[in-house]
């Protein structure tokens, strides 16, 4: 009986050792093989950073001549909320897929729709929203995404055309 329990104990030790080695091999595989990604632009947070084009590779397109006043969503019925903003689009000068395409012409073909996107964006925001400095950064990112989506409608291989939205003035009441 003592020999039988020693045999079971020995088998149990072997099973645990095999499982431990298997777990170590899987962990090593995950850290070594899966840890190396081909995307060198991925950051620690998992976000993919855009390639930063030089100033020569970008073109600025003003959305309006000068600044523009937009209505904000009213919190109080008897008080109008407004924001005055000058909006400029900083675009890539050339497209990756179609090097011959003139980016300024493509953006200007959609200028009214882009202006409408900006109007709609601010109509959903309150004066309390626009007071926050972080909101400006979020507005730039959100409008950049929306404008790029608009410019890529019907395109088989969409690519970013607008590098960033620039607010050169930001006054609200």
Image (tube, rainbow, N blue to C red):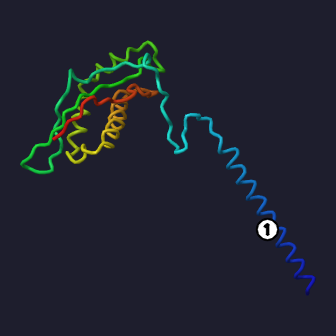
Q: Residues within 10 Å of mark 1 (few under 14, many from 20)?
A: few
- Measuring 22% from the left and 31% from the top, which residue is drawn there? 85
Q: Residue furthest top?
A: 100
Q: Position of residue 80 (x, y in %)?
A: 10, 43
Tally of marks: 1
The C terminus - image quarter: top left
The N terminus - image quarter: bottom right
User: 127 or 171: nearer the eye?
Assistant: 171
Apparent side of residue 114 relative to residue 90 in the rendered image (left or right) = left
The residue at which mark 1 appears reads as: 16
Is 167 situated above or below 11? Answer: above
- Measuring 17% from the left and 45% from the top, which residue is drawn there? 73
Q: Position of residue 84 (x, y in %)?
A: 19, 33
User: 43 or 171: nearer the eye?
Assistant: 171
Q: Residue furthest bottom?
A: 1
Label 1 SS: helix
Q: Position of residue 123 (x, y in %)?
A: 20, 41
Apparent side of residue 93 relative to residue 124 in the rendered image (left or right) = right
Q: Residue furthest right?
A: 3
- Measuring 23% from the left and 25% from the top, which residue is drawn there? 112
- Measuring 35% from the left and 32% from the top, which residue is drawn there? 144
Is 136 situated above or below 90? Answer: below
Apparent side of residue 149 relative to residue 172 in the rendered image (left or right) = right
User: 162 or 96: nearer the eye?
Assistant: 162
Q: Position of residue 4 (x, y in %)?
A: 90, 82
Which quadrant of the view contains residue 61? top left
């Amino acid at each position: 009986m003592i020999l039988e329990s020693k045999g079971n104990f020995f088998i149990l030790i072997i099973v645990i050792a095999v499982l431990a080695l298997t777990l170590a091999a899987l962990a090593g595989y995950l850290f070594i093989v899966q840890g190396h990604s081909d995307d060198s632009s991925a950051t620690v947070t998992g976000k993919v950073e855009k390639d930063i084009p030089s100033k020569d590779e970008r073109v600025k397109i003003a959305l309006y001549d000068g600044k523009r006043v937009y209505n904000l969503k009213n919190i109080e019925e008897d008080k109008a909320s407004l924001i005055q903003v000058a909006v400029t689009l900083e675009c890539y000068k050339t497209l990756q897929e179609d090097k011959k395409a003139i980016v300024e012409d493509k953006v200007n073909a959609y200028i009214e729709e882009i202006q409408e996107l900006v109007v709609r964006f601010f109509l959903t925001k309150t004066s309390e929203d626009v007071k926050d400095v972080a909101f400006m950064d979020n507005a730039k990112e959100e409008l950049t995404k929306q404008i790029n989506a608009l410019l890529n409608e019907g395109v088989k291989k969409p690519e970013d055309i607008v590098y960033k939205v620039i607010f050169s003035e930001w006054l609200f009441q």
